[in-house]
Amino acid sequence: MSGQDTASPTEVPEAWLVRVEPGTADQLMERTLRMAERRGAMLLFLDEDMTFGADHLTSALHHAKKAFAEGRNSSDSLAMETLLYASGERQLSSAIRKMGVDDETTGVVIARLTEVDVDPETGWTPYRDDLRQPDEERLLRFGISREELATAHETRRLDLVLEKVAAVDLIRK
């Protein structure tokens, strides 16, 4: 894998949150990807509702870079590999359905996966961790079962998301 070093577990990707009107997330993504391509930057676009903070993004990027370094990657793109891990899914099509932006998206998380700088546009705010624990319904939509929720204290529910990220390595073997 050329040009993609293994991420340390503490490497937090720079990320922004962009509020959009329903039906416009694809336009934002296409316009921003063209800009990023010209600069040589790699960006990942995620639905805010299925993104659970900096630890979630950091873990997904770390596992994706490690998969590339070890020749275990499922895709040719660091962005798609990171999306796969972020989703906790085994198949890219499932990962895209779960985490990708669509016509109903109202919040887009844009994560910069490479060292190349990206100038945030007007309306992009730094993506911050929501210090509240996600509600049960959101975790269920992500794929955390009620049984799994019952095993974690309310203050530790985000750990279940990180376990899904790490489990992608196990289900891919």
Image: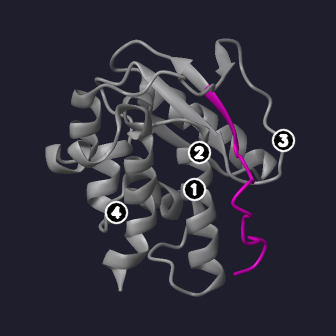
> Which residue is rendered at x = 70% and y = 49% of the image?
37
| Cβ atoms at labels 2 and 1 below 8 Å apart | yes
The residue tagged 4 is 92
Report the mark closest to the observer, 3 or 2. Answer: 2
Estimate how packed mark 4 is, as few (under 14), some (14 to 19) or many (20 or more) residues with alpha carbons within 10 Å: some
Q: CA distance from mark 4 to mark 1?
A: 17 Å
- Disc 2 residue type (three-letter): Asp
Estimate how packed mark 3 is, as few (under 14), some (14 to 19) or many (20 or more) residues with alpha carbons within 10 Å: few
The residue tagged 3 is 117
| Cβ atoms at labels 3 and 1 below 8 Å apart | no
Q: CA distance from mark 4 to mark 3?
A: 27 Å
Q: Position of residue 27 (x, y in %)?
A: 47, 27
Task: Label the magenta part by its dominant secondary structure.
Answer: loop
Q: Position of residue 8 (x, y in %)?
A: 74, 64
The residue tagged 2 is 55
> Which residue is rendered at x = 43% and y = 75% of the image?
169
Tell me the quadrant of the picture where the C terminus can be found: bottom left
Q: What secondary structure is marked by label 3? A: loop
Side of 122 where 147 appears, left or right? left
Q: CA distance from mark 2 to mark 1?
A: 6 Å
> Which residue is rendered at x = 64% and y = 12% of the image?
123
